[in-house]
Every structure is written in structure tokens, then in C-alpha cells.
Amino acid sequence: MSKACIAVDSACDLPSAFIASHGIRILPIKLKLGDKTFLDTRDQRRTVQLYASTRLEKHFAAESEPVSATEMSELMEKELALKYDVVLAITISSKRSDVYKNIREAAFVSTEKCKAIRERQGKTGPFKIKVIDSETLFPGQGLLVYEAIRLLEQKKMSLRDIINSLEAVKGGIRAYLVPDSLFHLKNRASAKGDNSVNWFSYQMGNMLDIKPIVEGHGGVTTPIDKVRGFTRGLKNLFDRAEAAMDKGLSINAVNMSYAGDLKQIERRPEYQDFLEIAKQKGVVTMLSVMSTTAAINVGPGAFALAFATRD
């Protein structure tokens, strides 16, 4: 597997340095902001600038759309098949996006074309692309990618064994989110099946600063708690992660993301306290800028956290 790579769609939340150091291939997602369309490739600087602007405010039309199976086929044939022998694509939940379906369809269509392209370049052996539905979102997807990298680079596992291992642990991944604004969850995420905020909770939440705690598990997102204020929302998420660490994690990491300048999270005492607790327990922690694709649906200022339990 010396010419293998892990590929993810741009909704996957992981630190830029981690993505670069492990050669993770980003598969873009189309973003439509008003009358303009561009590709989300997880450019951290550009994403932070977007959050700081007014382009994702309530009045601004915004939506995300996966690249088509045809466009994915072109990417495989022109780039991936020539650079790698094996690609393991780990996608956002298939219940929230067609990324998984489109990559699988593209792989089926392009198999023979990729073989012919490789032969013309003198490359022996078939080109393989395998796809895993992470059944989770944002930092949850990133957590599964973190584990895939560990198994590939540290454990030197075969592709089959890596897939089997990931399939065994992904059901334990739980991703949590606390929004800053309720508008996006009510109006944009709901269009993709998220019913975390209805009209009544939206009105009451705005008046009383009530934030829902949203859990993503097994491809389903559900409001499981509510708190007053964003700070208490952060504490709620950190407490859940700490309790899970005490019980034992199936992936020794907690992955986090924030839709904004990371300094706004890093300077918070709740975050600093959590990092110290995780360090004492020997658990890896990661924090990244939340993807634009995610923030279009959950809003700037949202914070998300994911871990994997053993049950």
C-alpha cells in the first residue's frame, strides 16, 4: 500500500496541518452563495475570511451540492488513477449528502477507463477505489479519517483490514454541536433532513438565548438537550467528552471544529481545562476550522465535537 491515499470530501473537519502532513486528498463540494458558485477545498484562510464577512448572514442565499458522478469520474481518470494504486474515500453520511453515492457510481463507471489509462502510462496492477460511508458529520467524519491514517501509517494494515476495522468502530462515533445562531439550523439544515430547531424553539431560543445540543449518531441528527448561552453549550459538550473518556474510547482522540477564528475557542477557559484533562488521560485532541460546507448548514460561530465510544 505504498501508493495508497485517504480521500475525504471537504465537509470533513480536520486540522490543515494534519491533512497536509498525511497527504489526505480533498474531494471538493460545490458551494452556492447567492449567484456565485465555487468549490470548497478546505482553504482555512479563505474560510475564516468568509466567516468574518457578512456573506453567510441570514438574508444571503447559500447551499452546498456534491460534485456529480461524472465530475468525480473525470477526477479519477485524470488524476487519482495515475498518482495512486489504492484510494480509500471516507465520506460524509449518505443520509445527508450524495457524495457517497456519486463516488461509488463514478468508481463503477471508471474502472475500465482507469485500467487503460494506467496501462498507457506503463503502470502495472489495477487501480482500486473503496468508499466508506462514515455515517457521521464534520468532526465525526474527521475522527474516522484519523483512525484510518493511524491504521495505515502506524499499523501498516492492509486495505481490507483497515476497512473492516473502520466499519467496526464507526457505529460508536458520536458528534455533538452547539450553534451560535439558530437561523441556519432552522432554515438551511432542515432542508437536508435536520429537524433540530422548529418554529417554536426558534422563537423561544432567540428570546431566551436557548441553544440546542444536537447529536449526530448513525447518520441521524437529534436535539438531545438545551442550555442557556453558548458558554454553557461548550461546557455541555466538553462534559460529555470527559465522561466518554472515563468509560473508554474506541478511537483514542477527540476531534473538534469551530466555524470561526480558532483563537475565539482557544482562549476560553472551558477549552483549556478540557485540553488539560484529555492530556492527563492520554487522549489526542484536535481542533480545526469548520468547513464552509458545514457552516452553510449550521451557521458561523457553531462548535462541534466528536468521539467514539466502545458501546
Image: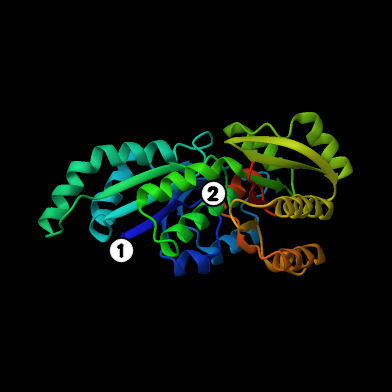
Residue at mark 1 to residue at mark 2: CA–CA distance: 24 Å
Q: Which residue of the protein is positioned furthest toward the right in this rendering?
A: 208
Residue at the spot of label 2: 141
For disc 2, the neighbor class at 10 Å (few under 14, some 14 to 19, many from 20) is many
Q: Nearer the viewer, residue 213 or 311?
A: 311
Pick the quarter of the image with the N terminus. bottom left
Q: Position of residue 258 (x, y in %)?
A: 66, 57
Q: Residue at x 45, y 67 (%)?
A: 20
Q: In this view of the protein, can residue 290 be seen by the observer?
A: yes
Pick the quarter of the image with the C terminus. top right
Which secondary structure lies at badge 2?
A: helix
Above or below, comparing residue 174 to residue 22 in the picture = above
Q: Quadrant of residue 263?
A: bottom right
Q: Quadrant of residue 286?
A: bottom right
Query: Which circle's residue, 1 or 2, is located before the other in the chain?
Result: 1
Report how many numbered discs are placed on residues in the image. 2
Above or below, comparing residue 153 to residue 126 in the picture = below
Q: Nearer the viewer, residue 74 or 32?
A: 74
Marker disc for residue 131: none
Q: Position of residue 119 (x, y in %)?
A: 12, 54
Q: Nearer the viewer, residue 196 or 208?
A: 196
Q: Residue at x 17, y 48 (%)?
A: 115
Q: Position of residue 114 (x, y in %)?
A: 20, 48
Q: Position of residue 299 (x, y in %)?
A: 66, 48
Q: Residue at x 76, y 37 (%)?
A: 224
Callouts 1 and 2 close, C-beta under 8 Å: no
Residue type for callout 2: Gln
Residue type for callout 1: Ser
Q: In this view of the protein, can residue 89 be seen by the observer?
A: no
Which secondary structure lies at badge 1?
A: loop
Residue at the spot of label 1: 2
